[in-house]
């Protein structure tokens, strides 16, 4: 017995494209720039997946240092900007480790520049948890890598185990 004719496909007619595909290209051309703007130019703050590794990588690549043992990243966000910026709040185990780490950052072979901790400096609004001015006896300094393409702004206190760091690129 042969199948009915309406079940046999007719290959003599051209296949019409689906109408949904017509909207895919304009959506793609409009959507990709919008997503790019959101993630790289909007100024919004996005949480970081591996903040300890990111900051440690910046320190290793830019300054040849690593974070002290026992350092914990409490908060970290990346600022969606054309020039990259990352905010970090660090917790070190002891005040002595903070003092030793800051001394290694301010070594004579690096160009650390003291700054007023209350002076405005950021590229945009800081995250809600960013409170270096609340630390007692807060001190601040800038530190750039040798190529001056990346830099750090450090906030620390000799009486606290918390460090605030802003890393930026140009």
Image (tube, rainbow, N blue to C red):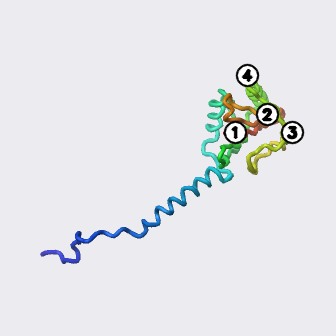
Residue position marked by numbered label 4 in the rendering? 109
Classify 10 Å Cα crowding around label 4: few (below 14), some (14-19), many (20 and above).
Answer: few
Mark 1 secondary-structure assignment: strand
Q: Residue at x 66, y 35 (%)?
A: 149
Is 47 located above or below residue 111 in the figure?
Answer: below
Given contact means CB atoms under 8 Å apart, are the residues at marks 2 and 1 in contact?
no
Mark nearest the camera among 2 and 3 is 2
**Residue at the extreme right of the image, as rendered:** 137
Up the image or down, 122 lies above or below 58; here it is: below
Q: CA distance from mark 1 to mark 3?
A: 22 Å
- Residue bearing the label numbered 1: 167
Residue 47 x, y percent position in the rendering: 65, 49
Q: Which mark is residue 71?
A: none
- Which residue is at 85% across, 37% downward? 116
Q: What is the crowding at mark 3: few (fewer than 14 residues within 10 Å), some, or many (at least 20)?
A: few
Q: Residue 162 location, x and y as percent? A: 77, 38
Frontmost residue, 51 versus 33: 33
Q: Vertically, is 18 above or below 95? A: below
Q: Residue at x 63, y 30 (%)?
A: 60
Q: Is residue 142 depicted above or below 80 in this figure? A: above
Q: Nearer the viewer, mark 4 or mark 3?
A: 4
The residue labelled by disc 2 is: 141
Q: Quadrant of the C terminus?
A: top right
Disc nearer the start of the sequence (4/3): 4
Q: CA distance from mark 2 to mark 3?
A: 16 Å
Q: Nearer the viewer, residue 26 or 59?
A: 26
**CB under 8 Å between discs 1 and 3:** no
């Amino acid at each position: 017995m042969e199948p009915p004719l309406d079940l046999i496909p007719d290959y003599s007619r051209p296949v019409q494209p689906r109408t949904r595909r017509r909207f895919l290209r304009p959506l793609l051309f409009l959507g990709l720039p919008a997503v790019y703007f959101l993630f790289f130019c909007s100024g919004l703050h996005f949480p970081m997946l591996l903040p300890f590794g990111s900051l440690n990588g910046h320190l290793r690549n830019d300054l040849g240092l690593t974070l002290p043992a026992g350092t914990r990243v409490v908060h970290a966000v990346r600022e969606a900007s054309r020039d990259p910026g990352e905010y970090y709040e660090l917790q070190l185990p002891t005040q002595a480790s903070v003092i030793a780490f800051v001394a290694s950052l301010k070594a004579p072979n690096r160009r650390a520049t003291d700054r007023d901790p209350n002076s405005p400096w950021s590229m945009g609004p800081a995250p809600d948890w960013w409170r270096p001015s609340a630390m007692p006896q807060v001190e601040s300094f800038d530190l750039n890598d040798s190529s001056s393409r990346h830099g750090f702004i450090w906030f620390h206190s000799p009486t606290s185990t918390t460090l605030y760091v802003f890393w930026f690129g140009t």
